[in-house]
Image (cartoon, coloured by chain):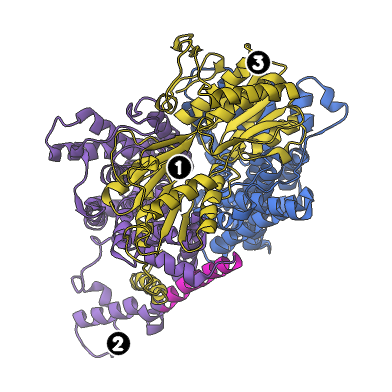
Chain colours: A blue, B yellow, C purple
């Protein structure tokens, strides 16, 4: 049962891990983006359409990232150039994503896509438990697991990351050193949107192989919450994403084992879990939040 | 962050002006009044669907039925509205159609019943037919319900599943424990048990008619439990068929023929074909014969009447001749007046619900609120 | 955000500010001078005044409609037909107009639920869940009372129960914020999903109508717990909502509490130094918001639905959030904003029928209007 829950956590967690990583980048630069939900939907639909049209799911994933980035660009422009409120704009961008994907996704419902399949990594996938959980997944899942440490390195060990974090912590200092906090934030928000789009792409072309209206059902919002849980750290993001999807896998597993518990109450559990964990961690997290971000929270 | 007040007031004016601008473009094209259908030769038929009209499932089937109506009656106007929720918004939507001259409205989702009944009471000149519900003892000249016997092909699909399963476990992903779903799960289980009495049906609820991520996860949890046949009662059906095929197990479809998605593991399924029934209902209303007709009551058709709109999908390669013969046999017994729920049928706790020689009425089937013995899951 | 009224110095009441009158200026007396200075500051040059406001707003909203039309065109639909159909079904005839009013009532209350906490600088994105709790609370009380009390008492108690349930749901993020510093925006957002599951569970299990023939809904509320109808489907809820808007306006702009709230929202450090109990003020603002959202659930369940249903009020909380932002958190302007968004939502029906497009496509128009207004209709502000 543990292996099954872990396997489900990873399989279902990839579509969360990408947006958590993306939102981590954006928030490290000082911008919160609730439009992540919209970017995910845009990514899911675009990847699906391009995947069907070209027959290449990789092109689809790329296009999904592009679509996620485009919506994030709307967010960046509104909050960075037009000075609009970050929380409100993010929600509006999500509305835009829901509406646009409903409008343009209509004719793609029920169309088959030749999506990503599981690719077992030789030798490693033979390891008991861990092998199946980590090394018998789809390529985008491997990509997300590589992306997390790469982004960690980028944020905390590279010059670019230093500038990015400066934009989120001490924009005035960055400015004094001849950097442009606005430009850095643009890049961070758009990159974050691209990752959210990639998460959507994994959802539609690898995990479910289906497109349907509003199929993310709040995963983008959950991702924003998980960023706090992960203390704006890309490595801890892995744990956050898998915690949530592991909770979903667990409740379904319990149902399948005939637990006489209402499925609806079980379904609320992952959300309650995140709230509870945030409540426990928040005091500590307050000091870890990028300083400029504190202004919008 | 002081904001001058004036522009905001101006803004609201501008917003109203913008809306008025749109109004300027609109003509007064209200159709005829809701007179007696057919009397003026200007017939309008409305359809409301609860989900998207191309969901590869329930709503798409109903939508295709409405298209068949448009094709069969080129002179009538067909109004279609998808994503009409099962809330009072449905009444507003039907009112909108009546304002556009609708004489007959098909409310095609189970949860639209109460609103169709309300509207029928308020609009005696408009005929309302509801798909899937029971109007019970509500006697109105302009209201009726209709449905097929969904559970018949589901039972026979269960036979195919029971014959194919080696683990003795089959998986059922569903949305909500409504009677239609419970009847399906029970019929499927009884069908499977008719070939292998040890069959267990493991059920998982997703809490949504179309939530692919939950479906994928649910399918995975069932596969992990050792099921080797997967079926479902969801509105969008692709994810689960694909998940089964990926995992190398069998799948049974629902709502739509998904055999192309699962060339290896497809067993069979059940799908809708509403065209003939819809067209006949429209014709009856146009002819002015609705009042007192079968459609004015709780109209149910099945194999016994020979026109079940719910039909068996094509068989996949894994269904043997022998199994098909069993299926034909069961189907013949339904034609002869039998039921998938012919006793003895016991519930999960082993209590006999229908004893040997008994079988439920339509009403009893459509208000079913329990799982039969052999089903793993909770109806709460 | 408009400034609170009480501390505003009365014109001419204190001559001191008008002291630096240029030497050699006409001795016109302090009163007149003050007025002149005030007028100069307030009205500014004409190009920053109302004319610009109208121009900006028209351009922004016009652009939203144009972009929306472009999307519709790209989808192969005739935008004129689509917009006409939207207008027709939302405002173009008495039934449509009535429907828009019916929808305005809960949206306005949901918007006010955002307005009050926003005055204290808090984000209540939990309206979606709070309205459901309002409906649940109202249902609970209505089922308890049945027809045991005279109608008037019943409906008041039902409304109070709904407001209390909404308040309680808002108390969770408010207290989490206060005690642990958890972002109320995030926790209230997550609680929306929990509220949805709670409602689903109630109508499928303990509260399911035993005579529903399998339909998933609660029993019908007693007629005593139904809001009086004004005409056709329009019920008294719209009046409740308008009164609430007036009350919120009074509370925020004419009471000390409202003034303190805006000080907290403007600069919580200053508020703390001024000796205000900042956390208490913020928590109460959030609770008032929750109660207002709860009332939105009450008017919908007692005025429209008559029962609890799993899919009721989907999106109302979020649209209320947008309406609050559209009105810049002004309780009276929120009336117009809620009406406009209600019209767009109701217009979605005409859009579906006339073009066959997904009804969710109206979200695009709402989003574009909001983007236009947040980003372009006002002068740029710092966040």
**Residue at 75% in and 21% down:** A129
Please determine if labels 3 and 1 lie on a single subunit. Answer: yes
Q: CA distance from mark 3 to mark 2?
A: 108 Å
At mark 3, the secondary structure is: helix
- Image depth: mark 3 or mark 1 in front: 3
N-term-proximal mark, 3 vs 1: 1
Identify the mark at residue B109; answer none if there is no mark: 1
Tags 3 and 1 touching, CB below 8 Å: no
Q: CA distance from mark 1 to mark 2?
A: 81 Å
> Crowding near pointer 2: few (<14 within 10 Å), some, many (20+)?
few
In the picture of the structure, the residue carrying the numbered disc 3 is B195
**Residue at 67% in and 32% down:** B268
At mark 2, the secondary structure is: loop
Identify the mark at residue C23; answer none if there is no mark: 2
Pinpoint residue A181: horizontal percent, then vertical percent: 63, 60
Q: Residue C307's image quarter?
A: top left
């Amino acid at each position: 049962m543990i292996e099954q829950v872990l396997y489900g956590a990873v399989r279902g967690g990839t579509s969360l891990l990408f947006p958590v990583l993306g939102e981590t980048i954006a928030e490290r630069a000082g911008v919160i983006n609730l439009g992540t939900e919209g970017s995910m939907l845009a990514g899911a639909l675009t990847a699906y359409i391009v995947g069907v049209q070209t027959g290449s799911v990789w092109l689809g994933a790329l296009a999904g990232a592009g679509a996620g980035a485009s919506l994030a660009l709307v967010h960046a422009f509104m909050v960075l150039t037009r000075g609009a409120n970050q929380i409100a704009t993010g929600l509006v961008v999500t509305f835009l994503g829901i509406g646009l994907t409903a409008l343009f996704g209509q004719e793609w419902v029920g169309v088959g896509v030749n999506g990503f399949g599981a690719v077992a990594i030789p030798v490693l996938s033979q390891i008991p438990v861990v092998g199946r959980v980590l090394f018998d997944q789809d390529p985008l899942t491997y990509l997300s697991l590589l992306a997390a440490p790469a982004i960690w390195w980028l944020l905390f060990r590279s010059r670019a990351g230093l500038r990015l974090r400066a934009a989120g912590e001490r924009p005035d200092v960055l400015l004094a050193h001849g950097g442009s906090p606005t430009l850095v934030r643009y890049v961070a928000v758009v990159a974050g949107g691209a990752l959210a789009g990639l998460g959507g792409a994994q959802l539609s072309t690898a995990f479910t192989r289906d497109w349907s209206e509003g199929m993310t059902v709040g995963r983008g919002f959950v991702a924003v919450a998980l960023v706090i849980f992960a203390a704006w750290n890309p490595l801890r993001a892995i744990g956050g994403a898998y915690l949530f999807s592991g909770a979903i896998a667990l409740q379904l597993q319990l149902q399948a084992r005939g637990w006489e518990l209402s499925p609806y109450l079980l379904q609320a559990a992952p959300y309650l879990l995140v709230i509870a964990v945030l409540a426990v961690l928040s005091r500590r997290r307050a000091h870890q939040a990028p300083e400029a971000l504190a202004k919008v929270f | 962050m002081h904001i001058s007040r004036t522009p905001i007031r101006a803004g609201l004016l501008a917003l109203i002006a913008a809306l008025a601008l749109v109004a300027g473009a609109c003509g007064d094209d209200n159709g005829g009044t809701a007179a007696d259908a057919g009397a003026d030769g200007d017939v309008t038929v409305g359809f409301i669907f609860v989900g998207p009209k191309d969901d590869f499932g329930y709503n798409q089937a109903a939508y295709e039925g409405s298209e068949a109506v448009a094709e069969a009656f080129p002179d009538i106007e067909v109004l279609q509205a998808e994503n009409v929720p099962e809330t009072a918004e449905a009444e507003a939507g039907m009112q909108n159609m009546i304002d556009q001259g609708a004489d007959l409205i098909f409310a095609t989702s189970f949860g639209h019943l109460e609103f169709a009944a309300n509207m029928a009471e308020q609009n005696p000149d408009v005929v309302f037919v509801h798909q899937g519900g029971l109007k019970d003892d509500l006697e109105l000249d302009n209201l009726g319900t209709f449905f097929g016997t969904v559970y018949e092909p589901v039972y026979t699909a269960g036979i195919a599943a029971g014959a194919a399963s080696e683990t003795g476990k089959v998986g059922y992903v569903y949305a909500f424990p409504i009677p239609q779903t419970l009847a399906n799960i029970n019929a499927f289980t009884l069908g499977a048990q008719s070939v292998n009495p040890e069959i267990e049906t493991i059920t998982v609820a997703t809490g949504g008619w179309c939530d692919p991520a939950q479906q994928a996860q649910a399918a995975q949890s069932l596969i992990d439990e050792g099921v080797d046949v997967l079926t479902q009662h969801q509105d969008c059906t692709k994810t689960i068929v694909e998940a089964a095929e990926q995992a190398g197990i069998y799948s049974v479809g629902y709502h739509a023929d998904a055999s192309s998605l699962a060339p290896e593991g497809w067993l069979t399924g059940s799908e809708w074909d509403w065209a003939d029934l819809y067209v006949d209902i429209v014709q009856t209303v146009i002819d002015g014969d609705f009042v007192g007709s079968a459609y004015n009551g709780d109209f149910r058709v099945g194999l016994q009447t020979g026109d079940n709109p719910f039909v068996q999908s094509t068989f996949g390669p894994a269904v043997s001749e022998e199994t098909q013969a069993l299926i034909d046999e069961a189907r013949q017994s339904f034609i002869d007046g039998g039921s998938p729920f012919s006793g003895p049928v016991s519930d999960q706790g082993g209590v006999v619900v229908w004893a040997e020689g008994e079988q439920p009425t339509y009403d009893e089937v459509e208000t079913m609120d329990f799982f039969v013995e052999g089903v793993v899951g909770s109806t709460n | 955000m408009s400034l609170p009224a009480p501390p505003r110095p009365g014109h001419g009441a204190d001559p001191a500010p008008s002291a630096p009158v240029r030497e050699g200026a006409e001795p016109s007396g302090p009163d007149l001078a003050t007025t002149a200075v005030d007028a100069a500051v307030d009205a500014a040059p004409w190009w920053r005044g109302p004319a610009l406001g109208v121009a900006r707003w028209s351009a922004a909203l016009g652009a939203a409609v144009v972009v929306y039309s472009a999307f519709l065109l790209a989808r192969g639909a005739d935008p004129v037909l689509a917009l006409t159909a939207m207008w027709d079904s939302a405002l173009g005839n008495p039934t449509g107009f009535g429907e828009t009013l019916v929808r305005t009532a809960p949206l306005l209350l949901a918007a006010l639920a955002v307005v009050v906490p926003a005055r204290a600088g808090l984000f209540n994105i939990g309206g979606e869940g709070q309205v459901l709790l309002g409906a649940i609370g109202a249902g609970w009380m209505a089922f308890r009372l049945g027809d045991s009390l005279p109608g008037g008492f019943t409906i008041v108690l039902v409304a109070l129960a709904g407001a209390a349930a909404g308040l309680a749901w808002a108390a969770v993020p408010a207290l989490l914020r206060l005690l642990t510093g958890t972002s109320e925006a995030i926790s209230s957002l997550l609680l929306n999903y929990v509220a949805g599951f709670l409602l689903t569970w109630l109508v499928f299990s303990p509260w399911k109508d035993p005579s529903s023939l399998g339909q998933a809904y609660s029993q019908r509320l007693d007629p005593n717990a139904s809001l009086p109808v004004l005409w056709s489907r329009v019920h008294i809820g719209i009046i409740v909502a308008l009164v609430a808007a007036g009350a919120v306006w009074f509370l925020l702009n004419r009471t000390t509490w409202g003034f303190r709230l805006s000080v907290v929202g403007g600069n919580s450090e200053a508020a703390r130094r001024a000796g205000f109990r900042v956390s208490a003020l913020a928590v109460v603002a959030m609770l008032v918001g929750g109660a207002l959202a709860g009332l939105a659930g009450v008017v919908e369940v007692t005025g429209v639905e008559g029962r609890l249903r799993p899919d009721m009020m989907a999106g109302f909380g979020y649209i209320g959030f947008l309406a609050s932002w559209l009105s810049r958190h002004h309780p009276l302007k929120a009336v117009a904003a809620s009406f406009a968004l209600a019209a767009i939502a109701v217009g979605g029906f005409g859009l579906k029928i006339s073009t066959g497009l997904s009804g969710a496509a109206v979200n695009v128009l709402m989003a574009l209007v909001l983007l236009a207004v947040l980003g372009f209709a006002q002068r740029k502000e710092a966040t």
